[in-house]
């Protein structure tokens, strides 16, 4: 027994290290299970509030007002544009205009980007709109130029946004001319370019075609511009597509948060493969 | 002091990115604690620093793991008060601890989280060395400004 205690005393720094590492690993496991969501939201709120204060000092009041006014104009124009583009696609495909109950342009929330981190350790945006203004997880974030990302965490006054240029980001996209569908992803590298996956060799996709969010997306409303095809390289079964993103992430100041796409029937039918009829 | 350094790191230094990496004030702080106070203290400080940094920026467990390891490894550079090491030797050990702590913290973060989808070898080796060098620069600056006196005591 004394030998054991001697050994314990001798290696106590190492044992302490092992203990702390075990706690850290346990925390990682708990995090994966979502046990710290509330704590993370609190941390984000605090962090974003400080960042907003820091950034706020650099803003001149008149410039901010002018930007807000311009953003409102942009928002109205974008709503009109999105509506007409969606209508055009609908007409071409012989679908009835106005059938899309998921698109409600009036419910857009305007928010300012108060923090942005793009490093090897963190890659996200923080906007100054949280659940107090109606922002919810999985809402689409966009600007008049195109899709920005998706809300992944919300606190009372702030929300964290996972941008397109994040390796975990995926969205269903469709080309405007050939109606080719694929999955938007970002595999690292330049923040101006993304990739589109799962486009078969047989597709008629051409360079310079515009890609928009599709109806298949589980979170984004359709018709939001994503980018333009700049390179098509054939692989064995699929094309490797490079896309020049429509949004310049280095100069984002204001964004819009689109209303949550609610399709309960779609969710039910996707999750429940056994049912044959949905009332 | 720990909280101040963590805040400076999260709200200040994390914005000075060079090739996606930034100097790590926490590594410098942990290295200083390690050299002055020993391995157990630096490991505990690393654990606590990771907790605070994790709450602020997310990924609590990973930050805890990275900073605990950084503190532990930096602890090998501990110089006891009763040692006959000169100031120059202490400072050299401090710089070594900074390099090791910075590299280790970056490597563990790289293994656990790779938001930019960078190749693992580039992320761990190239950016790890770059981050360690940036942290070393910060350590040299801190030493010139106010740490030298502490080492002389």
Image: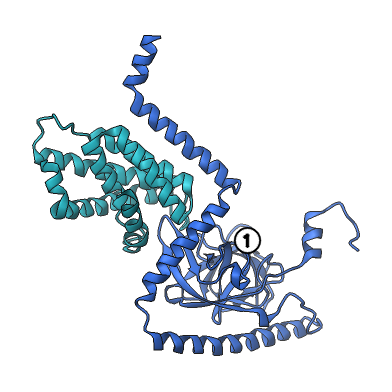
**Chain of the residue that carries numbered disc 1 in the rendered image:** A
Q: How many labels does the image show?
A: 1
Q: Where is residue A165 in the image (x, y as percent from the top left)?
A: 50, 65
The quarter of the rendered structure image containing the C terminus of chain A is bottom right
What residue is shown with label 1? A238
Q: In this view, does B90 lie above or below A6?
A: below
Figure chain in cyan: B
Residue A78 occupies quadrant: bottom right
Q: Position of residue A14 (x, y in %)?
A: 36, 28
- Residue B105 appears in the rendering: yes
Query: Seen in the image, is B40 located left or right of residue A163?
Result: left
Q: How is the image coloured?
A: by chain
Residue at the spot x=75%, y=82% of the render?
A90
- Residue A240 appears in the rendering: no
Query: Seen in the image, is B52 located left or right of residue A203?
Result: left
Q: Nearer the viewer, residue B105 or B33?
A: B33
Residue at the spot x=23%, y=54% of the render?
B138
Q: Position of residue A193 (x, y in %)?
A: 49, 69
Query: Seen in the image, is A262 located left or right of residue A80?
Result: right
Q: What element carries label 1?
A: strand
The quarter of the rendered structure image containing the N terminus of chain A is top left
Query: Seen in the image, is A148 located left or right of residue A1?
Result: right
Figure chain in blue: A
Q: Nearer the viewer, residue A208 or A70?
A: A70
Q: Where is residue A255 in the image (x, y as percent from the top left)?
A: 53, 77
């Amino acid at each position: 027994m004394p030998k054991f205690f001697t050994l314990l005393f001798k290696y106590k720094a190492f044992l302490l290290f092992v203990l702390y590492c075990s706690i850290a690993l346990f925390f990682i496991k708990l995090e994966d299970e979502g046990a710290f969501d509330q704590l993370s939201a609190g941390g984000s709120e605090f962090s974003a509030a400080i960042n907003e204060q820091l950034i706020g000092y650099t803003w001149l009041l008149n410039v901010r007002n002018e930007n807000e006014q311009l953003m409102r104009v942009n928002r109205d124009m974008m709503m009109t544009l999105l509506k007409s583009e969606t209508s055009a696609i609908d007409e071409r495909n012989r679908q009835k205009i106005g059938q899309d109950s998921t698109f409600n342009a009036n419910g857009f929330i305007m928010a300012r980007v108060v923090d942005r981190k793009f490093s090897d350790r963190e890659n996200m945006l923080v906007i100054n709109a949280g659940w107090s203004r109606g922002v919810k997880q999985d809402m689409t974030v966009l600007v008049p130029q195109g899709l920005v990302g998706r809300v992944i965490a919300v606190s009372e006054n702030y929300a964290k946004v996972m941008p397109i240029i994040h390796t975990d980001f995926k969205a269903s996209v469709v080309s405007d001319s050939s109606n080719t569908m694929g999955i938007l992803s970002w595999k690292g590298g330049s923040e101006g370019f993304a990739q589109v996956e799962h486009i078969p060799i047989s597709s008629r996709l051409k360079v310079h075609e515009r890609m928009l969010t599709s109806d298949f997306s589980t979170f984004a409303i359709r018709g939001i511009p994503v980018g333009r095809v700049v390179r098509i390289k054939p692989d064995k079964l699929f094309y490797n597509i490079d896309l020049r993103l429509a949004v310049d992430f280095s100069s984002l100041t204001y964004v819009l948060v689109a209303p949550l796409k609610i399709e309960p029937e779609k969710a039910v039918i996707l999750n429940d493969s056994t049912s044959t009829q949905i009332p | 002091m720990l909280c101040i350094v963590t805040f400076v790191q999260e709200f200040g230094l994390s914005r000075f990115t060079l090739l996606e990496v930034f100097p790590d004030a926490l590594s410098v702080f942990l290295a200083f604690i390690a050299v002055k106070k020993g391995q157990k203290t630096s490991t505990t400080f690393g654990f606590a620093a990771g907790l605070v940094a994790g709450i602020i920026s997310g990924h609590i467990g990973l930050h805890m793991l990275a900073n605990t390891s950084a503190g532990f490894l930096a602890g090998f550079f501990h110089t006891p008060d009763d040692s006959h090491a000169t100031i120059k030797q202490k400072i050299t050990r401090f710089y070594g601890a900074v390099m090791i702590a910075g590299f280790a913290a970056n490597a563990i973060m790289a293994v656990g989280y790779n938001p930019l989808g960078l190749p693992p070898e580039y992320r761990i080796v190239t950016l790890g060395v770059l981050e360690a060098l940036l942290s070393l620069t910060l350590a040299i600056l801190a030493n010139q400004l106010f740490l030298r006196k502490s080492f002389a005591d």
